Amino acid sequence: MTDTRSAASAAPDIPAGRSRKVRGRPLLYTSYAQDMALLDTRAKRVSTLVLVVLAFGLSVLLQDRSLEVLAGAYVLAIGAIGLNIVTGYAGQVSLGHAFFVAIGAYTAAALSGPVDGENLGYGIAELWIWLPAAGLVAAAAGVLVAPLATRLRGLYLAVVTLGLVFLGEHIFKEWQELTGGPGVGREAAVPQLFGVRLDQDGPLGTKEQLLYTLMLALLIVFAVAARNLARSRIGRAFAAIRDRDIAAAVIGVPLTRYKVLAFGISSFYAGCAGGLLYTISGYVEPGSFNLLLSVQFIAMVLIGGVATVSGAIAGALFISLLQPVTRSLPALVPFISGDTTQTPNVFQVETVLYGLLIVLFLIFEPRGLFGLWIRVRNYWKSWPFSY
Amino acid sequence: MKGLLESVIRGLGNGSVYALLALGFVIIYKATRVISFAQPALMLAGGVAVSYLAAVTGFYPAVLLSALLIAGVALVVERVAIRPMVGRPVFVVAIITLGIDVVVRVVVNGFIGRDVRQVGDPWGFTQVSLGPLVVQSRWLAMMLVTAVLVALLFAFFRYTRYGLAMRAAAFDQEIALAQGVSVGAVFALSWGLAGFLAAIAGMFVGTGQGIEQMTWVIALKALPAIIVGGLDSLGGAVVGGLVVGVVESLFQSYQGEFAPWLGQNFAVVSPYVVMLIVLLVRPYGLFGTREVERV
Amino acid sequence: MKSRSATGFIAIVALLSACGVFRGDDQGGEGAAAQAPGVTAEPCPSAVDTKKGCIYLGTVSDLTSGPFAALAVPITDAQKAFWARVNKAGGIGGKYEVDVTRYVKDNKYNPEVHRQVYNEIKDQVLGLAQTLGSPTTAAIIGDLKANNIVAAPASWTSAWEFEDVIIETGSNYCVEAMNSVDYAMDTYKPKSVMAVHLAGDYGADAAAGAKFAAERNGLKFTSVETPTGATEQGRAITEITKNKPDLVILTTGPADAATIVGQTAAAGYKGRFIGTGPTWNPALLQSPAAPALKALYEQSAPGRPWDADTPGHKAMRDALPGVTPNDGYTSGWAWAYPLKAALDQMVAGGDVSRKGLLAAVKTLKTVDYEGMLPPEAGNYADATGASVFRQTLINKVDDKATTGVTTVKDFFVGPTAQAHTFDGPCYTKL
């Protein structure tokens, strides 16, 4: 991401030298650079380090099937961070995320697919080639769509981007050479890094361990990049547009350019997420890229917390883990029948719970998981005088 | 020419069902500024309720009872899940309605079971001749009922106290509150109306072929309709619904012949293409209110 | 930043640990380290004879909100009843009983969910009694093959003829459509055929079969792809009434089929319809399309309907008292026979394991379907095109029959299917 570098160059006149912190006063900043730092307090640095180490540690702690679910959640988190850039930071609500995810998924699958297979393929299995390519093709599509989007606001934009999903679904169902067609599908991208197949058990670990580690590493890269973007000039322009686009235009933010940029970057993230997501199951079917997927991304952003990177990650984890959790919950309530002919049965309860938990969560904490965290943090910050 | 006109009438028939659904979306939008994604589930529930009640009370009373029943369900949903969210970001509420949609749909699916449920309508596939044209009587029924409902609805908004209250609340909630309008009641009423209309639409969707678990997808057709018409225009919703119906019907009849390069079944996505074209020209739909921008 | 999600993260990790998902705590099932996965010396949870051991089979199906829920639920129920009957009759080789109730999962017809729930149960089951859908099964086929897990599919696509671990029962849609066209050649002497079909492994598979048969019989062939949804059938209806083919091969859902048949008949169309198994639902007899269906429609099917007079059908009807009859039950029940035969063979052979089961499957040249299907339908000895079962039958609408259809032509193979060489899934050749 070239944008991260511009963060430093955007504020050249700020003295970088006097950034010594005063011990024991974590919230006292003596320079602008300190205020803008990625991890501005010691507590954050330590806890982030612990979390990252813990997350990598999970790959040897958890069972393969749990790792697989988490790996999927991390990829979705990359997509959610992308949506958060356009929806959370720049305020342009997009229900078209599934479309860009699909473009990424098929670019990656086509590039890494076998040359003489049933579907389009170019035989480039190296991850470091197809991943950026998937992102770039999706970003190009995002940039193409953006001029239309800049004319629209709010719910109009949401429904129009929704139209994109339906049009995309049509194209992907029709373009059978690329996608295999509905109900048939094709092999997804092959994750191969410097000759090592990551979707097969190898000397470095099981397939799930390898994929988990890969996804986690990529998530960290994408998350840091997004966070850097948010605190750069571009991020501030996005926030200005979100808060009041006319006011932003008045203070000299070129609206169209930044809206197009927001869509482009967001689609890049979506494309990368799409390329990675289906490497886990190894199979991609055009019916997957529907309204539901877009809505899930929106739900991740809203449940996690709008305009926060950590919120998007937490939201993706919440939504991805909600299904396994709802699957295990009915087992704790013995009077619900496992018999599919009876109503209610466990499967209906499972599906209802999924909907209900989302509803209840948003009713009780509309600011999302991030809001919950702020509450908890403030409680302990002012402890024992918190009320 | 005959085929063309028959296609148009089929489009107007299906379009009037979309119009009923679109009206529900717009009424809720005008009152609460939220697009309710729970409409598909309410529509499905309406059709299923008719299919159960028709055997007991006969078809026409069943339609009325079901519409009232679904209006009741919508009122409960509004009170329990939407009212606490007043003043919250609209997209949070939209996601909540989606959650409600999933919940209601699973419950309704339990009632549908594994069979195709018949609504017991008197029309079936019978056809009538209009001069040289042969059209299905159910399309005429759809158009007629929609026309009557739309007229009633407009009269309601124009001439009754509650209609006035709803218009006031849609215009400016705070001022309406200051004038003694119960905005909460307006929210409830809008959901009730939307539920009522969705149930009628559900009944019509079930005529002829019956109702399956997957029938809910049809309600999504109303989304391009409301955007074509303009999100906050009741008349626009009706026009949008009809436009979507006719365009879809024409694509169904002629795309295979004249534009096969668009791929099989382009008709399914044709409403979205119309929507995009309309928005390129008019960013607030055909009849939507242009947002006044002040710095 | 990540640190801010600490609370949620830790809560989730705590929850995961509560569910027992940490590495190494239960790779082999409960207290059965020496046993193969999914096989225990302890009796089944609802055992008839507590002295027998238990073989667990998993089921991954579309049970609530997916497009095939209406079919998947009766299939799953029928299989529960089937295995309950097997257990009552002495189980497998007098040593084991079979449980298919403990590991039942809902895939919502989504490949990713399918794979997740499959992973949740795969260490606890010996094989899969049911894996519903083609794209969903494709998402786990690699894993099935790698672990030698035998699975019975719930779909009749021609793709499964080429997999060892998948034990399909009955003819695929491709064969069904070929036979339908050949049957129509004998009965109605059509000059032109139109395939009206959904996209993908179901619709395109049948359309391809119809195409092969039309080519062989020198008929004019057209195909119309149609989406699901009753209001979306306008194009299909227009194409039929405009081109007036003598024969239409339908591969859609039941409501779509009723719309197409009802509306084209109302518009004066007089040709014949033959629909694949899933185009029929007994509830269509109450629909306004019923007269048209009775006049113009026949159903091709890979197996005899609910009412048929065979020991297998009778056992099924006795085992499922009080259900609304539906041929989903019939299919589900019939699909279970090969797995039972393979399990019997495996226990008799002594190697009670996944490998043993797969080896047993490969020895099966015939399966006793108790008359529901000819024994040669269960030929798994060579999983190539040669072993493809090619018999289907034709049903007609009959209001007196419980599921609304009775057989007009019993199991037969048309000349097209007889001569056809299967060298890949049909739908790729449309």
Image: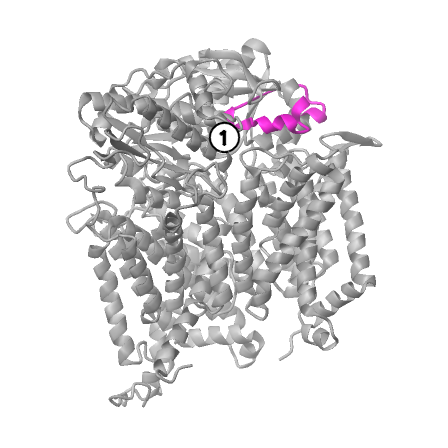
Closer to the camera in the image, B225 or A22: A22
Total labels drawn = 1
Give the magenta part as a residue range: C265-291
Residue C417 rendering spot, x and y as whole percentages: 43, 15
The residue drawn where x is 60% and y is 49% is B40
The residue drawn where x is 56% and y is 79% is A247
- In the image, A27: left or right of B84? left
The residue drawn where x is 34% and y is 66% is A223
Identify the image quadrant of the N terminus of chain A.
bottom left
Q: Which residue is mark 1?
A: C203
Residue C82 in view here:
yes
Residue A24 rendering spot, x and y as whole percentages: 26, 88
Residue C3 rendering spot, x and y as whole percentages: 31, 71
Closer to the camera in the image, C318 or A285: C318
Q: Chain of mark 1?
A: C
Q: Is residue A214 above or below residue C152?
A: below
